[in-house]
Image: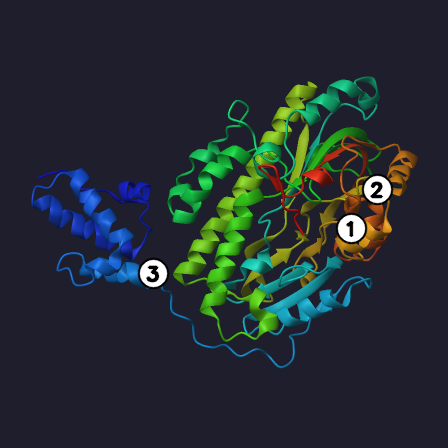
Amino acid sequence: MTKKLTGKELLAEGWPPGPIMGAALEAAETLLADNLDRGEVLARLNGVRLAPAQFRSDPLFGVLAQRLIELEQPKATPAASIRETPIPFRVWGTDFEPQTLQQLENAARLPVSQAAALMPDGHPGYGLPIGGVLGTENSVIPYGVGVDIACRMRMSIYDEPPSLLNAQGDRLRKALLFNTRFGLGERDGEWDPRNRRDHPLLDDPRWHELSLLRHLHDKAVRQMGTSGTSNHFAEWAALNVLEDIPQLGLQAGDTRLCFVTHSGSRGIGATIAQEYTRIAKDLRPELPKQFHELAWLDLESEAGQEYWLAMHVAGDFASACHQMIHQTVSAAAGLQPAAFVENHHNFAWEETHGGKTLIVHRKGATPAAAGELGVVPGTMADKGYLVLGLGNEDSLDSSSHGAGRPRSRTASKQMITRHQRDAYLKQRGVELLNPDAGVDESPQAYKNPAEVMAQQTDLVRPIATFQPLMVMMASDEKFGKKKGKDTKRR
């Protein structure tokens, strides 16, 4: 008898894990017992997977075909009523657009919501606002996590002083310019085949567990070690230590050169967010229009488990990108990091709060459990902060993830000129390596970082500051361009 097929072989062929794969293996065993070769068996199984309706009445493949059909046509979950009044939530800060507060209030009215909070850098987003924190019961909201899944900060700290940037500025400038890519599309935000970065995550078997992840793997290869668009950046900065930080080997008064990056899961996270938001909306057609982008997935459902897996793969991809950027930039600069700090947002964590197990969504909010280190950036010219979490239960152990916006990007573009931005940078001694970066990323387009920090003294404690000195980010003219077509991203 021919050797049995394995689940790993079916995964490689595009089969989903779970009961469907079990039915496929049972059918394969029957065929192999009839002395069909393995290639013919795989071909027949794939024929069923690609056109299950044609095999609904087949005596051998009928059960398998029916399960495939049910997978393609998920049933809507029972209607869930929206609360008439939102659950209580706390707000840190005062300077918010009305839409920001309305979005959080909508999230607090979901039947699955158990706790909520708004950080002082809050501003409107899709579904949950940026700076929104939401604890739900046994459910996850794809747009509550966000489009850029697991966007994060990473800081490498060196033994060298910031004055090295003056002494060897050209070398550090080139190290930054040539070791990551910003933007969208094949020319800007991806590597050409000769320069692609390799990382063990690209060989992770989880890429083969879902058809969507298999589809995204090639993009992951092309984008490994890139930085993205929008407010993502890479910068050399001066770290000033305010108090002893034993876990990093730093003492109060130390001044060190550091390298800081902000980026996420790129096209990987965006595709996952959009696909599973579509599925969540299809499963909850009863939701009123203003709640559509807050559609959730039950974690015990197949779609919920798939999203949870995909979210974690996207998170690991984002982390791997930062690792590659820091590794290659440090090596090109001839530096060896003495310590590093990394934290992420735009994610969902399973945590215990108030004696309950919750799925805590932090969309543009930094984890800030007691004693937890975090990096909270300022602007491209204003200092950011290395912070220590204070573990405030009212915020679900969270803090801001940056300065936040007082107005929309469009409004900032109408108010701020490049001359105003460049004058602000010059006054603070900051070199912007690509002066064609959008004015909607100007320091004036953000809230005052120091004021934001002053509004969350019960959430985190600053233990060091970092002042940007040399900054790189995406160019405005490159946003949305692909294959020569200008499709400017909004």
Label 3 environment density (alpha carbons within 10 Å; few <14, some 14–19, many ≥20)? some
Residue 382 is tagged as 2
Quadrant of the frame with the N terminus? top left
Amino acid identity at mark 2: Asp
SS type, badge 3? helix
When asked about the image quadrant of residue 437, the answer is top right
Which residue was labeled with disc 1?
403
Q: Could you say which is closer to the camera, residue 432 or residue 158? A: 432
Amino acid identity at mark 3: Leu
SS type, badge 2? loop
Which residue was labeled with disc 3?
71
Which residue lies most toward the bottom here?
84
- Indicate how the structure is coloured in the image: rainbow
Q: CA distance from mark 1 to mark 2?
A: 10 Å
Q: CA distance from mark 1 to mark 3?
A: 43 Å
Label 2 environment density (alpha carbons within 10 Å; few <14, some 14–19, many ≥20)? many
